[in-house]
Image (cartoon, grey):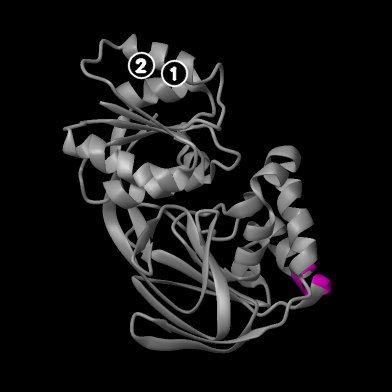
Amino acid sequence: MAVIAHRKKTLGAGLDRARVLITDHGVGDLLWYEVPKSRKAPKKVRDALRRGAGLVFVWGGDGMVQRCADVMAGSGVPMAILPAGTGNLFATNLGIPLDLEEAVRAGFHGRRAELDLGRVNGEHFAVMAGAGFEAEMIADADGRAKKRFGRLGYVRAAVRHVGGPLVPMKVEIDGTPWFEGEASCLLIGNVGTIAGGVEAFDDARPDDGWLEVGVSTAKGPVQWARVLGTMATGRSDESPFVRMTRARKVKARFGSPLTYELDGGDRKATTRIKARAVPGALTVCLP
């Protein structure tokens, strides 16, 4: 089995304790990899799979899980998540405990579930993808801010971006035109709770073979306050500034380049998004 760890992330008594807990289960060969940044993880995952790992523990947050899931998709090898990041939305949505001992126990003794992933511009994601306002907010809420302020870090970043311009946007859902107009952001979700702990997609499930899709036309602090207030007290699709549906395939074209993000990691600006659901792509160990 293998451990792929972001060495700068912390959980419980740390990586040394994790090694003890894992080896207590009588494992054979243990492949141990530590990386300084999540983007270094895919190479280690490929090596672990090539060397025959039958279970991969991933130590880190959503960005680390996303990088590893992108490689593990379709392999059938189970991923056990040790949620050591500043953001652990995938683990939280799945009920994986933010406790080192319990998370290790789930990896060895929990049930195996085949869960969906999304795929955007050739790269898999587990939680969500976003372009526009939401992606700019995440890019602005750097790791230090998230670690220091938690959800407030996202709020602080959001306040700096609510006055941004609307962008011309065309969105196709499963080959059919669905939205054309000016919008502030596009969201594509695999689970319900997204950045900052916001319940964005009320009906989302990571095992239904669908992606949830949302477009917001909100502009300025007053309209965004109404959107977030509706999300907090009711269903997100009840907001007059939000349109939502679900799809297996999504194509979007923007009038000007927009930053986009996958599971909290920002990517280069683009004028096009091409996304699809990948049912049952990742096997995950659940409590």
Can residue 243 be seen by looking at this rendering? Answer: no
Q: Residues within 10 Å of mark 2 (few under 14, many from 20)?
A: some
Classify residue 157 by image quadrant: bottom right
156 up-or-down from 145: above or below = below
Q: Residue at x 28, y 57 (%)?
A: 279
In the rendering, at what x and y percent does residue 190 appear? 44, 57
- The residue labelled by disc 2 is 22
Quick one: which residue is furthest to the right in this view? Answer: 222
Q: Residue at x 49, y 37 (%)?
A: 36
Left or right: where does residue 9 sit relative to residue 227?
left
169 up-or-down from 43: above or below = below
Provide the residue span drawn in magenta. Answer: 221-225
What secondary structure is marked by label 2? helix
- The residue labelled by disc 1 is 18
38 up-or-down from 100: above or below = below
Q: How many marks?
A: 2
Classify residue 103 by image quadrant: top left
Q: Residue at x 80, y 63 (%)?
A: 159
Position of the C terminus by quadrant: top left
Left or right: where does residue 89 sit relative to residue 125?
right
Q: Are marks 2 and 1 in contact (CB under 8 Å)?
A: yes
Q: Residues within 10 Å of mark 1 (few under 14, many from 20)?
A: many
Can residue 138 be seen by looking at this rendering? Answer: yes
Classify residue 250 by image quadrant: bottom left
Q: Name which residue type carries label 2.
A: Ile
In the rendering, at what x and y percent does residue 277 appear? 33, 64
What secondary structure is marked by label 1? helix
The chief SS type of the magenta part is: helix
In the rendering, at what x and y percent does residue 146 appear? 68, 44
Left or right: where does residue 33 sit relative to residue 10?
left
In the rendering, at what x and y percent does residue 217 appear? 66, 80
Q: Nearer the viewer, residue 170 or 209?
A: 170
